[in-house]
Amino acid sequence: MLVHLHVKNLALIDEAEVDFTEGLNILTGETGAGKSILIGSINLALGQKASREMIRENTDYAFVELVFQVNEKTEEKLRQMDIFPEDGQVIISRKLTGNRSICKINGETCTVSAVKAAAAYLLDIHGQHEHQSLLYPEKQMEILDAYGKEEIFEKKSETADLFQEYAALKKELESYELDEEQRKREMDFLSYEISEIEEAQLREGEDEELEAQYKKLLNGKKITETLGEVYELTGYEQEGSAEQIGRGVRKLSQIAELDENLNGLYAMLNDVDALLSDFNREVSGYLTDFSFSQEQFGEIESRLDRINRLKAKYGREISDVLSYKEEKEAERERLENFELHKSQLEKALAEKTKILEEKSRELTLLRKAWAEKLEKEVIAGLQDLNFLEVTFSIDFQEKETFGPGGKDRICFLISTNPGEPVRELSKVVSGGELSRIMLAIKTILADKDEKETLIFDEIDTGISGRTAWKVSEKMAVIGREHQVLCITHLPQIAAQADAHFLIEKNVEKQETQTRIFRLPDEESIRELARMLGGDKITDAGLSNAAEMKEMAQQQKNTRLK
């Protein structure tokens, strides 16, 4: 769950820190106090698009930090993403500076996409307009599959894997849609490329050997001239080093007998003479063996040109060129046996289609079984939310083509008045009714949702009176299984709070600032009184607020258990 929020220099917030609790955390405040900024800061930390305008005036940066305490199941999923909670905690932060932002998880810099991936396991934010997504068939299918995930998930995964195999076979078969003339042209071109490589008789490593020989021949003149000079300088000519050292050896041998201490010097010079003699023999041998041949040079140059042309066309290395030839041989073989391969693919695709049809039917039957259960629960949930005469059903249609999720297309149908036929949600309900339908579904899914924290941002828009009480009961129900953060303007919902936070806006030193703090019980009642009656808080308003708080507590202690 989200245990701590720290915001600094964001919009109207100078600096704010708040500790949230388990259960239902209610956030209230006057219109314009900055309630949306608080949810915006959480969204920002979790990867929402950032802009320079979010940074508070006259400051250089904005900073948001979230601290989550996670359970073992969530911790295991995070570990699979190479995120390792410390003492069960995950700390996500984001710092905005100008047009740049830096995201961190547990102190390590990471990408925005990594934060979004982690957030998918940590919390779910239901904004003011998210209930509109309920109008789309994709969202409706997502809800049904989540409701029956114990059985549907495995079958859906099998179907998705089969679909990938089916799609690959179908794509490969489409490549066989060639007329005879086009097939002949492709075979001729492939044969030309294969022959060009075969005729070159390439050998791996050959180019490196030829490059070394080419370089040696290209510099042959310089090599022989320089080695000749070296040989003269170090050889046995009159001024050569070998001749001079040889004379030195002979002279030193004459006096070495006169003083035994000279034996060491004589031995050293004798070694030098022997080494230089070996060196000169090597140089002489190299010069004797080395001969520059214009014909050989031309052959090497021509061979290298041919190899390099092939490498330019077919691959960076000779091994790549040879691999390319093997691929083209396989492709030519496929075209040569065109009808056979096509027949084999058609047979494989037919078999895969049959299996996919069967798995899709199984998935449809599962979904229909769970849809019946969901229909009943949604109707009961909507009745609890003051839809007294409501009919709800899930219509199934079969798509013409397969998808990763089979061939099902579903549509949520509803009738909110007795005697009226069920119709699509978009043609029946208002915004306020739609938010209640989404809340009913969220309540049903609460015990199946593995995210520990759910955030509701003013989804109670457009409701009041008895309906508001019903909605408040649903929020309390969700709060039994999850940590809930709920921004609301309804006192009926605020009265259900396990922890009540006030967001207020003040002007200090000609600067507007938003701050958030937890209200003790007495102040919570005063806030409820303000929500009930406006800025002027009367004794009657306080009495009504206290009564409302007591009724909510009794409700939580009895009905909701």
Image (cartoon, rainbow, N blue to C red):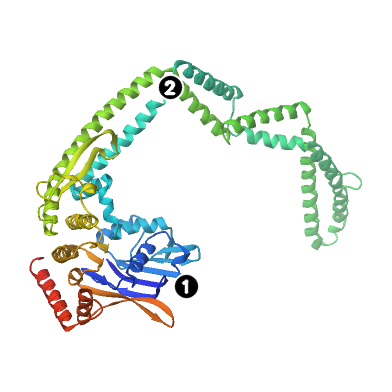
Q: Nearer the viewer, residue 183 or 538?
A: 538
Specify the quadrant that holds the N terminus: bottom left
Decide: is 485 above or below 117. Answer: below
Q: Residues within 10 Å of mark 2 (few under 14, many from 20)?
A: some
Q: Amino acid at mark 2?
A: Arg
Q: Is residue 201 left or right of residue 109?
A: right
Q: Position of residue 487 (x, y in %)?
A: 27, 67
Q: Position of residue 162 (x, y in %)?
A: 29, 35
Decide: is 224 above or below 60. Answer: above
Q: Residue at x 59, y 31 (%)?
A: 313
Q: Amino acid at mark 1?
A: Glu
For this orientation, the residue located farthest to the left is 558
Q: Is residue 42 left or right of residue 286?
A: left
The residue singled out by tag 1 in the image is 57
Within the image, what quadrant is residue 295 found in? top right
Q: Is residue 242 left or right of residue 349?
A: right
The residue singled out by tag 2 in the image is 334
Q: Nearer the viewer, residue 326 or 141?
A: 141
Within the image, what quadrant is residue 530 found in? bottom left
Marks 2/1: CA distance?
68 Å
Which numbered disc, 2 or 1, marks the residue that appears first in the sequence? 1
Q: Residue at x 61, y 29 (%)?
A: 310
Q: Residues within 10 Å of mark 1 (few under 14, many from 20)?
A: some
Decide: is 508 above or below 423. Answer: below
Disc 1 on helix, strand or loop? loop
